[in-house]
Image (cartoon, rainbow, N blue to C red):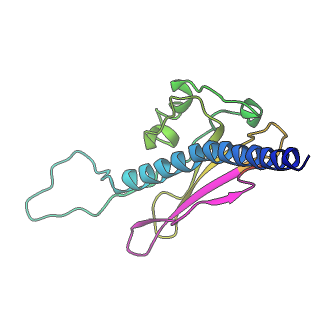
Amino acid sequence: MIVVAIVGILAVLAIYGVRKYLANAKTAEATNALGRLANAASTEYENERMAGTVLAAGSSSSLSRALCKSASHSVPSSASLIAGRKYQSADSEWEVDFAGGSGFSCLEFTIDQPQYYMYSYAAGGTGAVGDSYTATANGDLNGDGILSTFQITGAVNSALVLNTAPNLVSTNPEE
């Protein structure tokens, strides 16, 4: 009887450990994707956006850095599409803002594998001192309607350098 009780306790602990491991594996998607988004935002900010004209000898031009504009939508478009399941996005969903040079298209960001999270990108301003961006991943891993949220932010400092937060902010990470 004691052996059966011990085996039962060990089984409960093993089930808990496996569920925790699976939840952590699923949240790794969000942390990796937001890290890629933050790197893309920094890279795009550092790109020079000058006109293609020739500078006259002895003249100079100012820096022309800019944040990518906000994405016009999230991918997928609704949290119901990732509620307790994976979603396979189409390339066209990431390229909606291609003509305007904004959003995921400007960031050159896509996810071509099935995803557990809904991604969004919002920028406040164009790249002046104090302007910022926020990249967000929302997921409903178990389909209960409670979203886990991961966010990373960045802001332009007084030296016109885009600083990104050193870590993600998470709410209900394993919802």
Q: Nearer the viewer, residue 37 or 123?
A: 37
Q: Nearer the viewer, residue 163 or 147?
A: 147
How many discs mark residues in the rendered view?
0
Q: Nearer the viewer, residue 51 or 130?
A: 130
In the rendered image, the vertical position of residue 21 relative to residue 159, given as above or below = above
Q: Please identify the residue farthest to the right as the structure is shown.
A: 1
Residue at point 59%, 60% (across, down): 168
Is residue 33 rendered magenta in the image? no
Task: Please state the horizontal and vertical placement of residue 167, each as a whole percent of the image.
Answer: 55, 63
Q: Is residue 83 left or right of residue 112?
A: right
Task: Please state the horizontal and vertical placement of residue 140, each as a whole percent of the image.
Answer: 75, 41
Q: Nearer the viewer, residue 64 or 6?
A: 6
Q: Residue 133 appears in which quarter of the rendering?
A: bottom right
Q: Is residue 41 left or right of residue 65?
A: right
Q: Which residues are magenta?
A: 149-173
In the rendered image, the vertical position of residue 158 relative to residue 6, given as above or below = below
Q: Please identify the residue farthest to the bottom as the structure is shown.
A: 158
Is residue 160 rendered magenta in the image? yes
In the rendered image, the vertical position of residue 79 relative to residue 173, given as above or below = above
Q: Is residue 34 left or right of residue 61?
A: right
Residue at point 39%, 50% (across, down): 44
Residue at point 56%, 60% (across, down): 153
Task: Please state the horizontal and vertical placement of residue 121, each as a whole percent of the image.
Answer: 58, 47
Q: Please identify the residue farthest to the left as the structure is shown.
A: 57
Q: Residue 55 appears in which quarter of the rendering?
A: bottom left
